[in-house]
Amino acid sequence: MNRPSSDYAPANSTDVVLHLAALTRELSQATAALVAADRDATLKRHAADLAEARAYLAAGGTIPERERIADDNTEKSEQDARLAETLARGLKAQIRALEIRIDVGRTYGATVRAELKTLAYSEAP
């Protein structure tokens, strides 16, 4: 993925627009990845919960013993669900960061336009 550098400062309004377009594409890709990751996490969480319930019902002994047996027998599916949920949370954080970068870019663009207007400069030929 071609990411704009986080310390990149566009020099003119055209650069600002190009930079914002790149960030918007990155946001779109991250959003699509989040949808897929959230679906995966939901399916894995359901599978882990179902496996634990089945293991609990199949186990013998007291309630605490059955819970411990069910936990032991479903450790892998629980781990898979937690990892999938962690990935989804990470993508949400990435999306929030991209949204902030886009807001900063908009502010920067407005500042560039205001400075150019003050200088009576036009980028148009």
Image: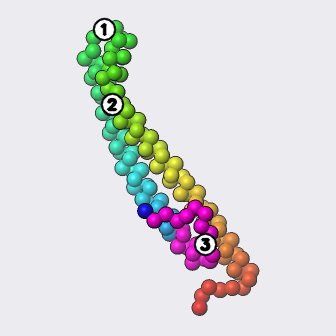
Q: Position of residue 56 (x, y in %)?
A: 30, 18
- Residue drawn at x 30%, y 8% is 61
Amino acid at pointer 3: Pro
Tell me the quarter of the image containing the C terminus: bottom right
Residue at image mark 1: 61
Left-right relation of 85 to 103: left
Amino acid at pointer 2: Lys
Q: Is residue 92 above or below residue 81?
A: below
User: Quarter-wise, where is residue 65 in the image?
Assistant: top left
Callout 1 environment at 10 Å: few (<14), some (14 to 19), or many (20+)?
A: few
- Residue drawn at x 52%, y 65% is 4
- The CA distance from mark 3 to mark 2 is 48 Å
Q: Position of residue 76 (x, y in %)?
A: 33, 30
Amino acid at pointer 1: Gly
Looking at the image, tell me whether mark 2 or mark 1 is earlier in sequence order.
1
Q: Position of residue 14 (x, y in %)?
A: 57, 78
Q: Which residues are magenta?
A: 2-20
* Circle 3/circle 1 CB separation < 8 Å: no
Q: Could you say which is closer to the camera, residue 3 or residue 32?
A: 3
Looking at the image, tell me whether mark 3 or mark 1 is earlier in sequence order.
3
Numbered tag placed on residue 34 in the rendering = none
- Residue drawn at x 54%, y 69% is 19
Q: Position of residue 109 (x, y in %)?
A: 63, 71
